[in-house]
Image (spheres, rainbow, N blue to C red):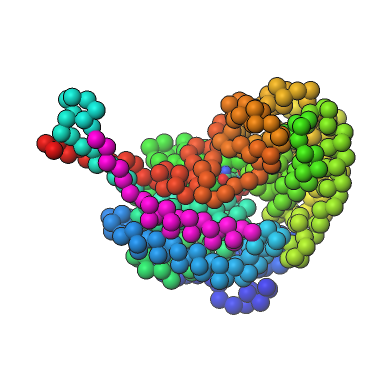
Amino acid sequence: MDENRSSEPRPFWLAGRPATGDAEEAVTSPHDGRVVGVHSVPTDEQVEQAVAAADAVRARAAALPLHVRAEALAHVSRRLGERAEEIARLITAENGKPVFWARGEVARAVSTFRFAAEETRRFGGEVQRLDTEPAAEGRLAYISRVPYGPVLGITPFNFPLNLVAHKVAPAIAVGAPIVVKPAPATPLTALVLGEILAETALPEGMFSVLPVPNDRAGALVDDPRLPVVSFTGSGPVGFSIMDRVPRKHVTLELGGNAAAVVLADADIDRAAARIALFSNYQAGQSCIAVQRVIVEDAVADEFTGKLLDAVGALVTGDPGDDKTQVGPLVSQAAAERVEGWINEAVAAGARLLTGGTRDGAAIAPTVLTGVPADAKVCREEVFGPVMVVQRVASVDEAFAAVNDSRYGLQAGVFTRSLDIAFRANRELEVGGLIIGDVPSYRADQMPYGGVKESGVGREGLRSAMEDLTHEKVMVLTGL
Ligand code: NAD
């Protein structure tokens, strides 16, 4: 795609229209370093115009008929479907994600917008009779949901389309204008989404996509005309935003070091295959990739053998190849960090069962065991194709190990027992629990988010729509 270098830079989206600034930025492939596209960068003045436009359309957006919102969302869903292969290839080019996974991401974004269109048609209010108390006889509460106002959506590099979709779709659904600030490593996909949004009948100012560098994002965060900040990304950045604007409505979807528990009654073949794949999908760059594998002693040897076979069978290499399952990380710097963490664990006494090597931005799928509990590969979020296998003697120990983390996004428990499933649901400190599978599962309509340092608030269409709105009560008297 080097030919893009000589063509015009991609415009960004200012109040629903294409615009160019006075600078441009090149985006490179993590796989081979080639330039895969160039985009224009908004000036400070253009950022100001985008925010002013969002503010100006705020009342009109909130009053937009539901059928107009739903039709716009359905249009985006259809167009993403029509342009699926092109967009998947773009995700692969800028992110390094194997095209197999990129196609899956586009399919999910198609669903995300479709779910939003469906939820929009159900978006309403509630009527509550208040005459449950004698003093409130003749009174009725009419409860509607009102958007807080224009949303600032800040998104990470690892799902350049679907996580932008999870900001944009619920905002449109509730009638809130949105300004998106995509990740600097992967802005091109968000700009294509802007192109599709611009085909809809949404009013001017309803959306902007502003690929500004991190050191200019603070102005957007601080701007009082954007009362909602919906952030997906790393904990340090997310919490610094929350500290910076404590009076704003801030939602944080952050990282984790997700655990998969394999109990003695599990289907070991399935557990090994699923864990091998979902520790390494997107080279481990998912907030719910399997990082910690907690296995009961009774099946640990059998499981580990099968796990290593399954990891050995993963197809690594060129992300543009249909068969590739594991590609590079987002940058060589990211891969060097992960390599450093593996080396640190090994120096502290961990046993490297497979992997541990780096080639440019790629890390070979890595399995470690006997890792000291304070090593970074256990305690921090690796965000690379690395898993740590830990043996435990009992279910008690397994659940204690899952909870021994400052994160709490999702966990997976491989068991056939319904009793253990409900016990896990009572005891595990996570926002989502997957029974019979890896933690790395998200259906886009379900509530999604973390506890502890994994986040504040929930996404998933209905949950996000609730999150972006407040309940307003009107009490009718004398009825
Ligand atoms: P990041 O925190 O580095 O960046 C996220 C976004 O914040 C980017 O758009 C970045 O440009 C922006 N940003 C950086 N500094 C900023 C500042 N000072 N002010 C405002 N914005 C700023 O995260 P990343 O490396 O892009 O993504 C990886 C992280 O995202 C991982 O921790 C991962 O677990 C997390 N993540 C969480 C979820 C979830 O739903 N919980 C999903 C995907 C990724």
Magenta residues, start to end: 104-129
Residue 266 falls within the magenta-colored stretch? no
User: Which image quarter holds the N terminus?
Assistant: bottom right
Q: Is residue 261 left or right of residue 252?
A: right
Residue 372 makes an appearance in the image: no
Q: Residue at x 45, y 44 (%)?
A: 463
Q: Residue at x 62, y 77 (%)?
A: 6
Residue 327 makes an appearance in the image: yes
User: Which image quarter holds the C terminus?
Assistant: top left
The answer to which quarter of the image holds residue 322 is bottom right
Q: Is residue 2 left or right of residue 117?
A: right
Q: Is residue 471 left or right of residue 111?
A: left
Q: Is residue 1 left or right of residue 359?
A: left
Q: How far across and down, in percent of the image, does residue 197 sit?
A: 45, 66
Q: Name the chief secondary structure element in magenta.
A: helix
Q: How far across and down, in percent of the image, does residue 240 sit?
A: 51, 39
Question: In the figure, 436 relative to 124: above or below?
Answer: above
Q: How far across and down, in percent of the image, does residue 174 sit?
A: 37, 52
Residue 108 falls within the magenta-colored stretch? yes
Between 383 and 422, the residue placed more toward the observer is 422
Between 33 and 130, the residue placed more toward the observer is 130
Q: How far across and down, in percent of the image, does residue 294 sit?
A: 75, 32
Q: Residue at x 58, y 26 (%)?
A: 426
Between 375 and 365, the residue placed more toward the observer is 365
